[in-house]
Amino acid sequence: MNHLPDFQPSSRRTFLRNVTALGMTFPFTSCTGAAGKNEKTQPEKKRPFRISVNVSTISGFKLPVKEQIRLSAAAGFEGIELWTSDVYRYVQNGGKAGDLKALLDDNGLILENIIAFSDWLSNDTQTSARGMEQMKKDMELTAQLGGHHIAATGGGLDVFLPDNLELYCRQYTEIVRMGQSFGVTPLLELWGHGTLNRLWKVLAIASGSHCPDAQLLLDFYHLYAGGNPFSALSLINGASLPVFHINDYPGDIPAETLQDSDRVYPGDGICPFDEVIPTLCRAGFRGALSLELFNASYWSGGQPQQVLDTGFRKTAAVVDKALTTL
């Protein structure tokens, strides 16, 4: 059996790196079955997916992007989602995207996804054309950072018109093909209180695009707020979900009136993780569960490292508990 060397890690990240280097794993459960009751006689298994973080979770602290990266790594997250607004600000102030890529690599973080907003999806073709130009710039930036996924939101769609479904499919097809030249795939995102609030809508657009590279970006909060049954996730190929936003929500607020700021740490609300995470796992999901919060009370009541540490700990606890039910 391997043993840890005699060292004093300067951070949780350092500890994790040394453990990984020794080929050791933590007692996590795979999707092939639950760990045995006698852990001494059962092999230890790694989580089947990564625990990552969307920097929205600490956005209220207004940190520069380099600090976001360092603190996220120190908390133990395996991957990160950055926002184009933060990266563009960094570049405009003289920074280089290549330096951020190097910093991500140095901190052992996978760039899971880039959060961007453009009106590429619209009932108005001129609005869509302008949005696609912005999406092209955002994809190029994503590639410079070493990323392969970018959020494709439906914020430019004022109303979902069933008769325009073929138009929406063509618009998504265009940005998917645009992304191929950069090695970047746009993830069609479901928003619980937006026009793309139903799972059937994003599935219709993605499948109607006839693009084998079509992928989705889903979220526990948004699925619930949009009135989507979690059982429907069993109908999706988990391989088409490279990133899944994880968060929780309170039970004393009606779903239709929930706001982004109401999201809480996983385990502090009513989301049925013990049911949904195994469903995702059985469906073939092997991507990143990325913590995405916008809770201002966390920003006013603590420090960014504290928020990230708490987020990692609570997310890991929820995930590991859910995996034991398989």
Image (cartoon, rainbow, N blue to C red):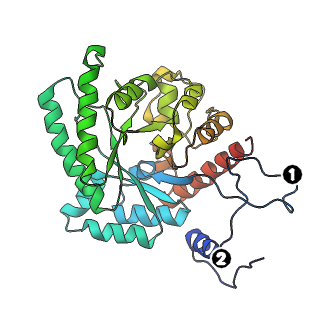
Q: Position of residue 298 (x, y in %)?
A: 50, 47
Vertical arrangement, residue 29 with respect to residue 247, above or below: below
Quarter of the image where the C terminus is located: top right
Residue 201 versus residue 263 in the image, above or below: above
Where does residue 196 sit, x and y in percent of width and height? Answer: 37, 26
Say left or right for 176 vs 231: left
The residue positioned 35% from the left and 57% from the top of the image is 147
Please give the name of the residue rendered at 47% of the width and 46% of the height, measured from the top-left corner.
Answer: 243
Q: Residue at x 26, y 22 (%)?
A: 166
Of helix, strand and loop, which one carries label 1? loop
| Mark 2 residue element | loop
- Residue 57, percent across and down? 46, 49
Residue shown at 58% from the left, 31% from the top = 234
Specify the amino acid type for callout 2.
Leu
Q: Is residue 189 visible?
A: yes
For the residue pair 4 and 72, the one nearer the viewer reads as 4
Location of residue 260 (image quadrant): top left
Residue with the mark numbered 1 = 37
**Left or right of residue 137: residue 69:** right
- Image quarter where the N terminus lies is bottom right
Q: Which of the labelled discs sits on residue 22, or is there none?
A: 2
Asked if the residues shown at circle 2 and circle 1 are in contact, with their CB atoms under 8 angstroms apart, the answer is no
How far is the residue under mark 2 from the one under mark 1?
A: 25 Å
Q: Quadrant of residue 119?
A: top left
Q: Which mark is residue 304?
A: none
Q: How packed is label 1: few (under 14 Cα within 10 Å), some, or many (20 or more)?
A: few
Residue located farthest toward the top when viewing the structure as drawn: 163
